[in-house]
Amino acid sequence: MIHEPSESTDSLACAHVWPDDERAETARRSLGVPVDDLGLVRLALTHRSYLNEQGIEAPQAVHYSNERLEFLGDSILGMLTAEALYLRFPDLPEGSLTAYRTALVRTETLAGWARRFELDALLYLGRGESAEIGEIRDRILAGAFEAVIAAIFLDQGLETTREFLGALLDEDAEAIISLGQETNYKGRLQELIQEQKRVTPSYRTVSIEGPAHERIFTVEVVSAGETIGVGTGSSKRIAQQMAAQRALIALTAEGDDDERPL
């Protein structure tokens, strides 16, 4: 029988949901944070697919998966990352800070941090929730990392959480932001537009010129009915990336072309 968990998660530690193993303790050592409540750590490591395989359905699964912690951790992560960027780059406009934050809290970044702490080997996960090559999907790892952030916050408070995340940002921020500037402009633009306006940008080809073997495509990217960038290239894909890059430049520039610090 499953008992309702208390706020202290004491009943989580006693419930017959998880095997008697050392994953939570191993995760605590790997994270290097003295989290007192191992029930919170165990909860942060538990994906809903694991509960489904145990025959635990909603509403019980709400209390025993990491989804609520993920929700909380997402907000904490966004706030602390915004704070760090605000203090680190005092001369950057809001648009640039938003683009930097987007690069730092994107799924790939969080999944990379989760792997650094070897959380991929510690998750309670259903057998079907892994990639074809056997690696856990980035989205699941990112969610687990957000849940861990929430667990640290609930157990140790905001300052310890700030120190934990700050160490990662100090080590990785410039490299992550620089990489984000160089790759997948379409993906970065979509994340930025969705965060700011809750819409998805679209692309339309406005012209195709030149002979068949030397086509030049012109593409514009549109957001909320407004053209925000135009690009050209030898294929639609290249032209779309160029349009997205120019849109990002326009969105993050405010009045002049200040040199970026990275």
Image: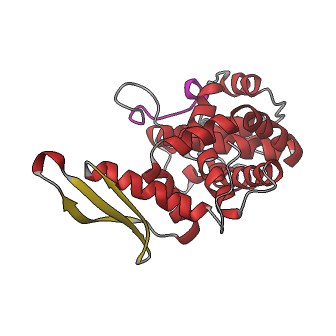
In the picture shown, does residue 14 fall above or below 245?
A: above
- For residue 46, say whether it is visible: no
- For residue 95, say whether it is visible: yes
In the picture shown, does residue 165 fall above or below 77?
A: above
Asked whether residue 123 is drawn in magenta, I would say yes
Residue located 55% across and 58% down the image? 249
Rendered-image quadrant of the N terminus? top right
Q: Position of residue 7 (x, y in %)?
A: 78, 51
Rendered-image quadrant of the C terminus? top right
In the picture, measured across the screen, residue 242 lies left or right of residue 115, that is left
Q: Judge by depth and name the residue closer to the eye, 158 or 258.
A: 258
In the picture shown, does residue 60 fall above or below 203?
A: above
Residue located 70% across and 26% down the image? 27
Residue located 67% across and 49% down the image? 260
Looking at this rendering, what residue extends furthest in the left direction?
A: 212
Residue located 58% across and 32% down the image? 112
Looking at this rendering, what residue extends furthest in the front direction?
A: 210
Q: Position of residue 43 (x, y in %)?
A: 66, 40
Q: Judge by depth and name the residue closer to the eye, 63 or 207.
A: 207
Occupied quadrant, residue 38? top right
Q: Position of residue 237 (x, y in %)?
A: 30, 50
Asked whether residue 229 is drawn in magenta, I would say no
Give the main secondary structure, helix, strand or loop, of the magenta stretch: loop
Q: Position of residue 179 (x, y in %)?
A: 56, 38
In the picture, measured across the screen, residue 59 lies left or right of residue 98, that is left
In the picture, measured across the screen, residue 244 lies left or right of residue 238, that is right
Q: Which residues are magenta?
A: 119-129
